[in-house]
Image: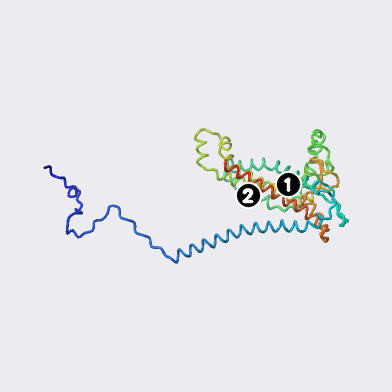
């Protein structure tokens, strides 16, 4: 018979079958020692979680309640004036006669057109500039220059609206006068630059107001876009550079696709800011009773500037109700713009 190799003896380990050893054999992989938990500490943690969750949910619900309350208040105060409005449908009328409160004639068509037109014009001017600044600050500028320049752009948001209005009317408008006259004389056959209902050289036009408004919303779009571009994964940028891509190719193939949703969000925030701007446009834009003609050299009232200009009429509930009805349309318009922006961002995130 072949002798059996004593593995236990050869390895130097005690024989587990040896009787009377009386010694416990240590496992090569000892079980982890259970961590003792403090019941009172766990209860405190769970209580803190519940409190934090309640505060977070309560904050979200509070915002929804406030927005709903604002909409309900505007509707409640607008209904009496709308009941006395003799216009067939005030969304399709540009008349605004509220002197006789027993039979008023008011519509918001012109205000809606001017508000949307000047805001979109400002957005078209501001978006490319904001994109260029954000790309330069995050991809090209030296660190010593990027910080101070970003801080300077952000400071534009701290300038009061009335300062922008005065600057636009008395400083910027005279500088833009030759440009406006040249556009009107040479490109007047295009509806954008045809002679409008205001003096081309006067400065109180959508052309001047839109440029000032573009400067006002520029820091909002730039700040949001810059913060998103900074979050581009460094590994993707280095991988593109390792493959021989130029700096612009890195921006085009990596930074822009990653940050496009943030860029759109910043643009929509800027548009919402432009739709509600009041004091600067009240100072720059000239009020007129003539119909709006979709020219950059038209004048008129936006929703906000019309309401601000008529503050003296708010002592009558029906006159005030007419302006509140206009404010209700502006409220719905901004709500729709923000909803579309959220949908666009969500769609790009899924894709």
Q: CA distance from mark 1 to mark 2?
A: 20 Å
Q: Is residue 339 left or right of residue 188?
A: left
Question: Pointer 1 and pointer 2: residues touching (CB < 8 Å)?
Answer: no
The mark found on residue 213 in the picture is 1
In the image, residue 56 above or below residue 116: below
Dot in front, 1 or 2: 1
Q: Nearer the viewer, residue 319 or 281?
A: 319
Q: Residue furthest bottom?
A: 40
Q: Is residue 176 left or right of residue 38?
A: right
Q: Is residue 350 left or right of residue 116?
A: left
The mark found on residue 66 in the picture is none
Q: Hey, which quadrant is residue 308 in on the image?
A: bottom right
- What is the image's colouring? rainbow
Q: Quadrant of the C terminus?
A: top right
Q: Quadrant of the N terminus?
A: top left
SS state under label 1: helix
Dot 2 crowding, Cα within 10 Å, few <14, some 14–19, many 20+ = few
SS state under label 2: helix
Q: Nearer the viewer, residue 311 or 318?
A: 318
Dot 1 crowding, Cα within 10 Å, few <14, some 14–19, many 20+ = many
Q: Position of residue 258 (x, y in %)?
A: 57, 41
Q: Residue furthest right?
A: 100
Q: Hey, which quadrant is residue 138 in on the image?
A: top right
Q: Earlier in the sequence, mark 1 or mark 2?
A: 2
In the image, residue 260 above or below residue 309: above
| Residue found at x 23% / y 58% | 24
Q: Position of residue 135 (x, y in %)?
A: 61, 41
Q: Tell me how many marks there are.
A: 2
Q: Position of residue 280 (x, y in %)?
A: 76, 50
| Residue found at x 58% / y 39% | 257
Q: What residue would you read off at disc 2?
A: 151
Q: Hey, which quadrant is residue 323 in on the image?
A: bottom right
């Amino acid at each position: 018979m072949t002798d059996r190799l004593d593995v236990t003896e050869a390895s130097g380990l005690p024989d587990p079958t040896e009787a009377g050893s009386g010694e416990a054999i240590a496992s090569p992989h000892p079980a982890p020692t259970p961590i003792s938990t403090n019941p009172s500490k766990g209860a405190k943690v769970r209580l803190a979680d519940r409190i934090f969750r309640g505060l977070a949910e309560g904050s979200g619900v509070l915002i929804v309640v406030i927005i709903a309350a604002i909409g309900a208040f505007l509707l409640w105060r607008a209904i009496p004036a709308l009941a006395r409005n003799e216009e067939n449908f005030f969304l399709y009328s540009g008349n605004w006669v509220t002197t006789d409160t027993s039979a008023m004639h008011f519509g918001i068509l012109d205000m809606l057109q001017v508000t949307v037109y000047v805001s979109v014009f400002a957005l078209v001017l501001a978006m490319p500039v904001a994109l260029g600044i954000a790309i330069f600050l995050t991809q090209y500028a030296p660190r010593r220059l990027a910080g101070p320049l970003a801080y300077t752009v952000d400071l534009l948001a701290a300038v009061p609206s009335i300062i922008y209005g005065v600057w636009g009317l008395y400083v910027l408008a005279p500088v833009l006068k030759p440009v406006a006259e040249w556009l009107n004389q040479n490109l007047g056959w295009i509806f954008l630059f045809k002679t409008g209902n205001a003096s081309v050289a006067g400065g109180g036009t959508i052309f001047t107001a839109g440029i000032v408004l573009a400067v006002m919303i520029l820091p909002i779009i730039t700040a949001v876009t810059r913060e998103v571009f900074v979050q581009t994964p460094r590994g993707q940028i280095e991988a593109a550079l390792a493959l021989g891509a130029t700096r612009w190719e890195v921006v085009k193939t990596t930074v822009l696709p990653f940050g496009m949703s943030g860029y759109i969000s910043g643009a929509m925030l800027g548009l919402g800011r432009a739709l509600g701007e009041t004091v600067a446009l009240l100072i720059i834009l000239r009020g007129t009773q003539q119909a709006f003609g979709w020219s950059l050299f038209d004048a008129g009232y936006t929703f906000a500037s019309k309401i601000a200009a008529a503050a003296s009429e708010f002592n009558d509930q029906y006159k005030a109700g007419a302006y509140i009805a206009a404010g209700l349309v502006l409220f719905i318009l901004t709500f729709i713009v923000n909803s579309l922006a959220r949908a666009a961002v969500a769609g790009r995130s899924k894709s």
